[in-house]
């Protein structure tokens, strides 16, 4: 990596980070459906895990929100476009069954260990 000036100068574009996140979600049993830009919220839509109830699927899926928030924040082209990230669980007809939403600034504090996991979860909005 010295040819590129070292890894500290290497910038990962949001699209690349999103591909990595959705690939990891698929590995653990979710099916990527789409992304949505809802005003100040970036939403990742997935189908729930097979043979899992909605609540456990949503809890598992919400674990990607900190990485999704960092990916948006770290890309200079998306950094100022959104205030929240959301993961939505859809059914086979693409109806929204449930979602979890977190403010990006809260997710960044969790990643930097500036707040506890409990404080992070208290700020997450679940809609079931």
Image: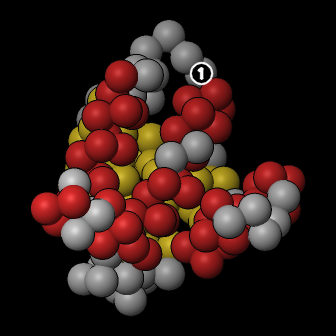
The quarter in which the N terminus is drawn is: bottom left
Residue, x 24% and y 83% (percent of image)? 77
Q: Which residue is the extreme one toward the left?
A: 3
Residue, x 51% and y 47% (percent of image)? 64
Residue, x 44% and y 58% (percent of image)? 68
Kind of element beneath mark 1: loop
Side of 126 where 28 appears, left or right: left
Residue 31 seen from this side = yes
Counting from the top left corner in percent of width and height, residue 8 is at: 37, 67
In this view, the residue in front, 117 or 91, is 117
Counting from the top left corner in percent of width and height, residue 59 is at: 64, 37
Mark count: 1
Residue, x 30% and y 43% (percent of image)? 20
Q: Is residue 2 above or below residue 106?
A: above
Q: Which residue is the extreme one toward the front?
A: 2
Q: Is residue 73 above or below residue 27?
A: below
Q: What residue sits right under mark 1 in the picture? A: 53
Q: Which residue is the extreme one toward the top?
A: 51
């Amino acid at each position: 990596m010295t040819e590129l000036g070292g890894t500290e100068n290497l910038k990962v574009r949001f699209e690349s980070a999103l591909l990595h996140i959705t690939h990891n979600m698929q590995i653990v049993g979710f099916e990527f459906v789409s992304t949505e830009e809802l005003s100040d919220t970036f939403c990742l839509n997935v189908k729930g895990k097979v043979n899992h109830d909605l609540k456990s699927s949503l809890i598992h899926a919400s674990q990607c929100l900190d990485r999704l928030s960092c990916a948006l924040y770290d890309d200079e082209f998306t950094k100022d476009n959104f205030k929240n990230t959301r993961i939505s669980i859809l059914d086979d007809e693409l109806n929204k069954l449930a979602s979890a939403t977190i403010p990006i600034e809260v997710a960044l504090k969790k990643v930097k260990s500036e707040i506890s996991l409990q404080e992070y979860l208290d700020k997450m909005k679940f809609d079931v």
